[in-house]
Image (tube, helix red, strand yellow):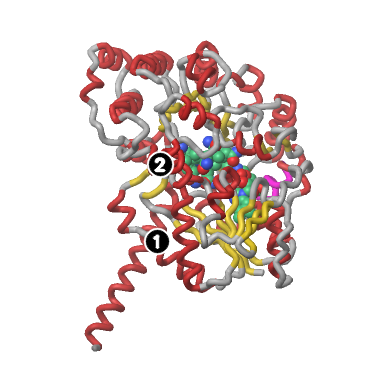
Amino acid sequence: MKIAFVYGAFENLGIEYLSAILKLHGHSTRLAFDPMLFNDPFMHIHSFSKLFDYQKILLKQILDYKPDMLAFSVVSSYYQWALKIAQEIKKYLPFVHITFGGIHPSAIPEKVLANDCVDSVVIGEGDNPLLELANSLGKGKLDHSIKNIWFKCDGQIIKNPLRPYIEELDSLPFPDKELYYDVIPKYKSGYTIVTRRGCINSCSFCCNNIWHMRYPGQKKIRFRSVDNVIMELKDALRRYNFKQLRINDDLFTYNADWLKEFSKAYKKNIGKPTCCFSSPDQINENVIRYLKDIKCYQICLGVQSVNPFLRKQVLNRGGDNKKIKEAIYLLRENKIRCVVDNILGIPGEKEEDLLETARFYNENRPNRICIFWLIYYPRTPIVDKALKEGILNDELIDSIEDDPYRGANTLQNKIHTKNKIRFHWLLLLLHFIPAGIYNSFIKKKLYKFLPLISPSILEALYTMLAKDRLDIPRKSSYIRYFPFMRGILKIKFENLLSKQEYHTHR
Ligand code: B12
């Protein structure tokens, strides 16, 4: 069977795992990659995104490959994009099987399957279900009883139950990196890995809640063995000689015993700089020692809010401000860059809470403050909270399920009040203004004069250009710009020329 995975902008480990298991069982796979230039959640410039629009090229690539199955990995932000491609493909290849998997379809399978262009939806961990689907299609007779998959059959929806989680993560083949590197060779320099699946926390805005809901009573987190992770990394080092390692685990520092064993083995066998995600309450002297051993140059801490009420009661997160402060100082002392993630637009958040955030960071100054506007992802607990408080209504929930990202992070949004954009600017300005001046800026309420347009372009430029920030993992997503900009313009120019030639010949 020929299977084309369809995704955009970023490297996707989920797809790499799925491709690996399919290849291991004799299927062939290909990545249909849309670079989504100027059109991803970190940088959106409408006119530029139109100029570098890739959809027609992508469609042609898919049609040229002549796949037997199209597999879409769908995060909520790409749901509409995925539907559009699937609809177009169905016009040319009406019998190709199109399946949607990943977090968005796992949250709202009924809605996703209601689209004519979607033949099946895979819920939860997709490795074995997708393999069984490919095998069954390969035999020419679709098996409608595959666990984790919902199908449409004679006007009915077949809702198969989920199988348990894969207990032995070591039994999985290593992710198929070639799938991505064939398309974007530059991604080789930053190797991406997960050492576990799942997360122990249940933050109200986070999609890990979807997994907890789909797999009730099962372990929230499963670990690969240290040996297995090191084996993958040794192999990767030999093949790609990567320059740095990006660890995608939601809470990498969780489980100090595992971390201790890993750091020792990593130091001995791999020794490349790393970056990872964690939370302030996880950071202590011990953990720092292990992070130093794995040459961690940057850690991204989920703070989300420095207001204790919002953090605990609304976001369902632990930790206190003392701990956040300590984490920032400990990291600074040990020369590990500290990036803090914060959410703007939390239900119940007041102007004073935002000023408190600005004052807190002005005092403690982490290396980088990242701001994410709260996006209500389908079926996360914070949606229910917002519904109860009248922030959302049924109609808005419907629109969120169709396209949460467009609605929430832009100026046209109906959910967040526009004046909060000024606080986004205010927190961004902290990187450019000395502490004293910044303080009077707040005191004199000068932030009221900040513009009401999104600072995302400045943020992107800052990420790309500031020298000491060159290593931010996010920056890796900008690697794709140059080769694809050139490629797209070349194709568009050639098309234009061939059209002109056509006209003159006539
Ligand atoms: C690393 C990471 C990133 C990276 C790379 C993202 C990427 N691949 O596109 C970076 C830093 C760039 C990033 C950016 C963002 N991210 Co992010 N990210 C993650 C993180 C922490 C890990 C992803 C990962 O590697 N997982 C490991 C793999 C093995 O698991 P998996 O992807 O879930 O895949 C399995 C199943 O889902 C399923 N599956 C997946 N796809 C498919 C497809 C088919 C056909 C099948 C059958 C099965 C299947 O099978 C896979 C194997 O078992 C996740 C949280 C998480 N734990 O998943 C958030 C997460 C994916 N990100 C999230 C968000 C919101 C974002 C941003 C929008 C941030 C922002 N607010 O601006 C951006 C934009 C991302 C985008 N693509 O649109 C959300 C998505 C929520 C949603 N409903 O869409 C998540 C779930 C975190 C959360 N808050 O809940 N992110």
Specify few, some or many for label 2: CA neighbours under 10 Å numbering under 14, 14-19, or 20 or more: few
Say which amino acid is labelled 1: Tyr
Q: Which is nearer the eye, 367 or 320?
A: 320
The N terminus sits in image quarter: bottom right
Q: Does the residue labelled 1 lie within 8 Å of ligand 1?
A: no
Mark number, residue 385:
none
Give the magenta range.
Answer: 230-237
**Image side of residue 281 versus residue 329, left or right:** right
99 vs 328: above or below: below
Give the dominant element type of the magenta stretch: helix, strand or loop: helix
Give residue 173's position: percent from left, percent from top. Answer: 73, 52
68 vs 269: above or below: below
Q: Which is nearer the eye, 312 or 3?
A: 312
Q: Is mark 2 within 8 Å of ligand 1?
A: yes
87 vs 415: above or below: below
**Image side of residue 461 versus residue 367, left or right:** left
Q: What residue sits 72% from the left and 70% below the top?
A: 141
Q: Name the residue under label 1.
A: 54
Q: Residue furthest front?
A: 155
The quadrant where residue 69 appears: bottom right
